[in-house]
Amino acid sequence: MIVRCWLMMCAALCLSACGGSSGGADAGAGSGDPPVSSSLLRAASSAELEQSLKQALASPQPAIELSLAPAVGDAGSGFSGTYTVEPLVDELDAVRYDGSHLFIAPQRFATCCFIADGLLPPVPPDPLARSIRILATDPATAGAAEVGRIALAEGESVQGLYVAGSRLFALTGEAFYGSYGPFWSDMAIWAPEKTGFRIYDVSNPASPVLESTATLDGVFVDSRRIGATVYLVSRFTPGFPDLALPVQDASQAARNEAALASMEVADLLPAITVDGSTRPLVGSDACYVSDETSPTPHAVLTTVTAIPLDRPDGFRSICYNADAYGLYVSEAAIYLTQAVFPSGAATGRTRIHKFALAGTSIDYRGSVEIDGQVWTGGQGDFRLSEHEGVLRVFATTYTANAGNPVDHQLLTIRERAQGGALEVVGRLPSARHPAAIGKPGEALYGVRFLGDAAYAVTFRQIDPLYAFDLSDPADPVLTGELEVSGFSDLLHPVGAGLLLGLGAADNGGLKLELFDVSDPASPRSRGSQVLGGAGSHSDARYDRHAFAYLADGGGQGIDRLAIPAVVSDPDAPGVPPRSGLYLFEIRGTGSPATASLATAGVLEPPDAGEGGARHRAFLHDESLFYVRDSAVWSALWASAANVRGPF
């Protein structure tokens, strides 16, 4: 089972991995499922939480194999930063830029990997590269120079970094399993595991000072930063070598019962050590238990921890006894998604839990189950969005209908007036608006919510871009659509009335298209650019952090963007593909009717080849900084061919 789950996970990395789904309260058009209530209940006592975990430890259920999805920056102060779903909600990444310094974590390597015939030995990284690099930049000349390093301990990997003022937050771990963290299915392959963090004072980048260090029980799921608070989601399963599973006979069952009876609730909860002082990561009085009656596949706690950067020992945590497969974070709340598979249900569902955030305060607000699966991770994270207290969600249900194997729905969800729960208040398709989202068999690709509007791209043979009006959450409306060739994985807002799509062209190349959505009833294309043919690819299609965008770059009323890409020439099949940072400009952003998209050059490092494993780009005034693997290359925007580096 472990090997099968691991292979499934590796496959999911190559596809668009996964969440689950749930049938929720019926609003608007009805799905065939009855309303489903869902909530977390604060543990009445430590004994109740202890009993819940012990029951799961004593009789774990078979692992649930999740179905897989079909293969399918901020601007400010003159420089671009890490591209995020929400402008004021920062996201963990291994490369950061604060306008004066680049912080580059070493590349991560799997400590081991399960394969069908056994274990693949770890790949030993270069010992000289086991440090966080700090480079000072000169945006006037596109110069960069290393000014400091932060050494890492043997066997320690960096999951990602945050930079906030003069502090650098480094999330560390004992092992790296790839970018699958938010979607781990019900298996204990990752347990036991420890996660940690270090906080440095980098006010003098040449001489960073370690301010605080911490290690906690559990595996990293995901993280966000809002202001001076980092929110860390982790998963923990108690591990006991004396517990023999599966149970083979009565004597073994008796020994397990005795072992469980000897445990106290403190033995079942994760601990944290901050600056040498160990204490519980979460107390039983801050834990919730699910109200579902079906047994959990294994004992697990999902913990949300709020860590103040200036006083990490003042952290606060809550937990609940179920899995988390993905998350969405607004400025005011965190929403955690959980796959559920009710007995007798034809398809899976998604359970969504809401926790209000305010500094280190984390307040459970309610839960709901919805029909369909909510894919998160990569560009799938854009499928959830909160606006004025309403959560909007795109979900997909996989059917047994060969002619139409997928159904997509758009849901609006908010807290019930009486509190304590979430409810679906609107959906599309609905009784008033029964038209399906997408044509039969079309998969859902790029999604973007912008205020009271939403946009979605579906694809099978052509690319319909759909526009939605969500101004009345109880009555979402499809207002217009546009059919063009190819499809978009990422949709980016360009000022008022313009939308940029990045995806694939119908010839297999990369495609950027500028859409005029100023008239929601009649979206139009304002032109496109296609790079190469079959075999061309870009990390930015699947990883938003590889996409760099600077509004009004250079102060000329022109938006600039850059994407790393490997481009194959369809007219020269024997010529090796080009690899570099491809530059584009959007001109006339103030007038959607006359706006245009144009190429602006390529920053192509001399040893480009097929490119590296990690690509990040940052635009600063007239300069470009391109991080490939751990090396930095640079150029001026107007002369991108004159490459400097590696730094």
Image: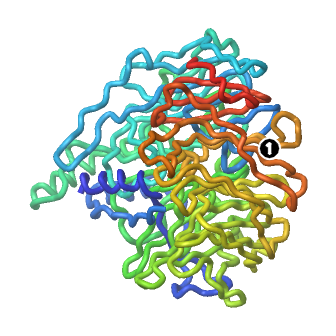
Residue 83 coordinates in the image, percent (x, y): 67, 43
Residue 173 coordinates in the image, percent (x, y): 43, 32
Which element type, helix, strand or loop, lies under badge 1?
strand
Q: Quadrant of residue 497?
A: bottom right
Residue 256 coordinates in the image, percent (x, y): 20, 52
Please tell me which residue lies in front, 118 or 490. Answer: 490
Specify the farthest residue to the top: 207
Please tell me which residue lies in front, 293 or 514. Answer: 514
Residue at 78% from the left image edge and 48% from the top image edge = 586
Q: Is residue 502 left or right of residue 303?
A: right
Please tell me which residue lies in front, 525 or 66. Answer: 525
Please tell me which residue lies in front, 238 or 168. Answer: 168
Q: Quadrant of the image for the N terminus?
A: bottom left
**Scheme of image coloration:** rainbow
Q: Where 356 sits versus 276, above or below?
A: below
Q: Which residue is mark 1?
A: 559
Amino acid of disc 1:
Asp
Residue 196 appears anywhere in the view: no
For label 1, the crowd category at 10 Å Cα-Cα, with few meaning under 14, some 14 to 19 and many 20 or more, is: many
Q: Is residue 403 left or right of residue 188?
A: right
Residue at 73% from the left image edge and 35% from the top image edge = 80
Q: Where 292 sits versus 249, above or below?
A: below
Q: Quadrant of residue 147?
A: top right
Q: Is residue 481 left or right of residue 506?
A: right
